[in-house]
C-alpha cells in the first residue's frame, strides 16, 4: 500500500531556539555580575527555572524540529545547547550542594565543564560564517564567554582573588555573556520580523 505523502508543515524553529538560548544566556550573565545580581550556586532560582523551561526543554525541542527539517547545523546547536542548560541546572541543583558539603573541588569541575562546552562551541564557530554574520557573532562571543568562564572558575579554584567580590573582572565576564545573549535575541527578532513582513526589515 502506498503511503500518502503530505506537504511539509514544520515551521522554522529558529526563533524559539535562539530566543531560548538568548534570554537564558542574558539571565545567566546577570548571575556572573557582582552583587546584588549574583546569588550563588544553590539559590540561583531565576537562572535554573529559565534554563529548565526555555533554555533547556524548549530549545531541545527546537533542535529536534530543525533536524526533522534537515538542518544539521541548527538542529545540532539547539539540541546541544538545550542539553547544556539541562545539564547545567541538574549539575548545580542536584550534585553541587552535596559536593560542596563533602569538600569536593567543585570549582575545578565547573572550569572543566566550561572548557568542554568551549570546545563544543568552537565546532560551531568554524562553521558559523556560512550562516550569516549574526549567527557568526553569536558563536564568536559565546566562545569568548566560555573562555572567560574557564579562566574565572580556574582562578577561583586556585585561590586567586581576581574574580572575588565586586570588581571589574566579574563585570567583564557577566557583561560579555549578557551581550552574547542580546545578539541571539536580536537574530531571533530579525528572523521573525523578516519572515512576518516578507522582506528584510532588520539586517541579519
Image (cartoon, rainbow, N blue to C red):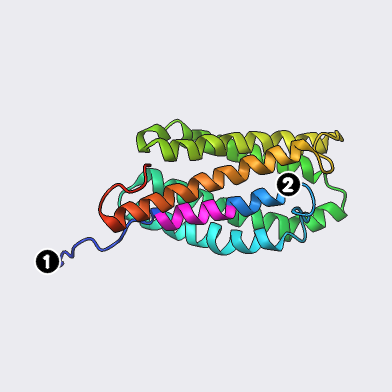
State which tag comes first along the sequence, 2 or 1.
Answer: 1
Can see residue 82?
A: no
Give the quarter of the figure containing the N terminus.
Answer: bottom left
- Horizontal placement of 95 versus 19: left or right? right
Q: CA gap, disc 2 to disc 1?
A: 60 Å
Q: Residue furthest top?
A: 126
Q: Which residues are magenta?
A: 15-24
Mark 2 = which residue? 33
User: In the image, what residue occupies the spot 87% across and 35% down?
Assistant: 159
Can see residue 42?
A: yes
Where residue 76 appears, as percent x and y from the top left, is 43, 47
Q: Main secondary structure of the magenta part?
A: helix
Q: Which mark is residue 2?
A: 1
- Horizontal placement of 126 versus 103: left or right? left
Where residue 15 appears, as percent x and y from the top left, is 41, 55
User: In the image, what residue occupies the spot 68% across and 51% down?
Assistant: 30
**61 falls in the magenta region:** no
- Horizontal placement of 11 versus 54: left or right? left
**21 falls in the magenta region:** yes
Q: Nearer the viewer, mark 2 or mark 1?
A: 2
Amino acid at each position: 500500500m502506498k503511503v500518502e505523502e503530505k506537504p511539509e508543515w514544520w515551521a522554522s524553529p529558529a526563533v524559539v531556539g535562539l530566543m531560548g538560548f538568548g534570554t537564558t544566556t542574558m539571565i545567566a550573565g546577570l548571575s556572573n555580575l557582582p552583587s546584588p545580581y549574583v546569588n550563588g550556586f544553590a539559590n540561583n532560582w531565576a537562572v535554573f527555572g529559565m534554563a529548565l523551561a526555555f533554555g533547556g526543554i524548549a530549545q531541545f525541542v527546537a533542535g529536534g524540529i530543525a533536524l526533522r527539517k534537515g538542518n544539521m547545523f541548527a538542529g545540532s546547536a539547539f539540541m546541544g545547547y538545550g542539553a547544556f542548560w539541562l545539564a547545567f541546572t541538574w549539575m548545580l541543583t542536584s550534585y553541587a550542594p552535596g559536593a560542596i558539603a563533602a569538600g569536593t573541588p567543585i570549582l575545578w569541575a565547573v572550569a572543566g565543564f566550561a572548557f568542554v562546552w568551549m570546545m563544543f562551541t568552537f565546532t560551531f564557530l568554524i562553521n558559523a560564517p556560512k550562516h550569516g554574520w549574526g549567527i557568526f557573532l553569536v558563536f564568536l562571543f559565546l566562545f569568548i564567554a566560555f573562555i572567560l568562564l574557564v579562566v574565572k572558575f580556574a582562578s577561583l579554584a586556585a585561590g586567586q582573588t581576581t574574580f572575588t567580590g565586586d570588581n571589574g573582572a566579574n563585570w567583564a565576564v557577566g557583561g560579555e555573556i549578557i551581550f552574547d545573549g542580546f545578539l541571539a535575541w536580536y537574530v531571533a527578532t530579525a528572523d521573525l520580523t523578516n519572515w512576518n513582513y516578507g522582506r528584510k526589515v532588520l539586517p541579519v
